[in-house]
Amino acid sequence: MSANLELIKGIFALEGLFEFLKRGEGLFDQVYREDALIDVRDFDTPGLDPVYVGHKEIRRFWMDWFGPWSSMTWEANFHEKGEWVLADVYEFRVQGESSGIELEMPHGQTFLFRDGLVDCTRIHPEREFAFIEAGIDSPS
């Protein structure tokens, strides 16, 4: 397992990640390059900007992403190819903070690394597009 894959798996497995990031705390400087970006253009979610660039914006993305939910659970499989790491989030459940509404939003997240840090993250609502982007064969 590469250091890149180990880093992403470790973040997804971090106990208390939801609460940690919801408060705006995080490991951003240790995970993302200073000029990194998060692209959520394909993940049409109200309240999210299409692209976030740099540590300050990435911190804001994670607060926006976690903000409206009172709870969040996920299960993911991980794959890698070259500088790409893919989190196939096949189970993703959230519950609205004020509404109590529960949603399921499986998706794929791709992480492109450069010099040991994440350079670009994309979130794909269609998991198969994450496999295509990373050049990884889908396990079907």
Image (cartoon, grey):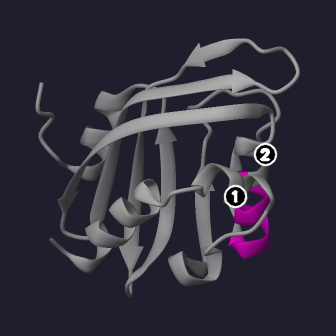
Residue placed at 11% from the left, 33% from the top?
139
| Crowding at mark 2 (Cα within 10 Å: few <14, some 14-19, many 20+) | some
Q: CA distance from mark 1 to mark 2?
A: 10 Å
Residue placed at 31% from the left, 46% from the top?
133
Q: Amino acid at mark 1?
A: Leu
Asked if residue 33 lies in the magenta stretch, the reply is no
Q: Which residue is the site of mark 1?
A: 21
Residue placed at 19% from the left, 75% from the top?
2
Quarter that holds the C terminus: top left
Residue placed at 69% from the left, 58% from the top?
21
Asked if residue 60 lies in the magenta stretch, the reply is yes
On screen, residue 92 versus residue 53, left or right, reads left
Question: Of callouts 1 and 2, which one flags the residue occurring earlier in the amino acid sequence?
Answer: 1
Q: Where's residue 31, x and y in %? A: 52, 76
Q: Where's residue 12, x and y in %? A: 44, 55
Q: Which residue is the site of mark 2?
A: 64
Q: Amino acid at mark 2?
A: Asp
Q: Is residue 17 above or below residue 44?
A: below
Observer-nearest of 44 and 29: 29
Q: Is residue 105 above or below residue 31?
A: above
